[in-house]
Amino acid sequence: MHVAEAFEEVARKYVESLLARGLIRYGELGRFVHKGIEVDLVAIDHANRVAYLFEVEWSDLSEGDVRILIRELEVKARQIPLEGYEYRFHVILRSYEGLKLTNADVVTIGDMSFVAE
C-alpha cells in the first residue's frame, strides 16, 4: 500500500469519527466513480438531503491550490445524481498554508485528534 492509499484510509476513519461524534450525519460513505468523475469520499445524508464531498491529498498545499480543488469538487458535484441535495465540500491534506475558507472545510493530519488516541 502506498502512502497516499494509506492516507485515504486515515481520511475515511476521520470521516467516520465525525459521524461518531455527531458532527455530521450520513447513511452511506464511499468513493464515487462514474463516467470519468471521481470523488475520494462522499458521505450522503438522505434524511437531510446533504452530500459531503471529500478530496483527500497526501500533499502540502497552499490556499490557491485548495481553492482549485474546491472548484473541481463543485464541478464534480454537478455530475453526482443527487437532485435537490445540498453539497458541502471538504479537503483533507497532509498540511495546508493559508486562510480559513468560507466555502469548504480544510483539515490536515494535525487536526485529526483521533489519530493520536
Image (cartoon, rainbow, N blue to C red):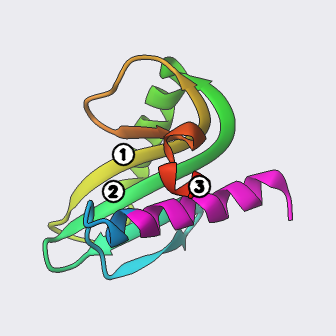
Q: Secondary structure at mark 1?
A: helix
The residue to which callout 3 is attached is 115
The residue that appears at 85% across and 57% down in the rendered structure is: 2
| Front position among marks 1 and 2 | 1
Residue neighbourhood size for the residue with mark 2, other residues' Cα within 10 Å, grouped as few (<14), some (14–19), many (≥20) = few
Q: Secondary structure at mark 2?
A: loop
Q: Does residue 73 sit above or below 96 in this rendering?
A: below
Q: Quadrant of residue 50?
A: bottom left
| Amino acid type, residue under disc 3 in the picture | Val
The residue to which callout 1 is attached is 74
Q: Does residue 64 sit above or below 56 in this rendering?
A: above
The image position of residue 33, as x and y in percent, is: 56, 70
Is disc 1 in contact with disc 2, using a CB cutoff of under 8 Å?
Answer: yes
The image position of residue 25, as x and y in percent, is: 25, 71
Q: Secondary structure at mark 3?
A: helix
Is disc 3 in contact with disc 1, using a CB cutoff of under 8 Å?
Answer: no
Residue 2 located within the stretch drawn in magenta: yes
Whichever of callouts 3 and 1 sits on the residue coming sooner in the sequence is: 1
The residue nearer to you, when weighing 104 against 80, is: 104
| Amino acid type, residue under disc 1 in the picture | Glu
Which quadrant is home to the C terminus? bottom right
Residue 102 vs residue 91: left or right? Answer: left
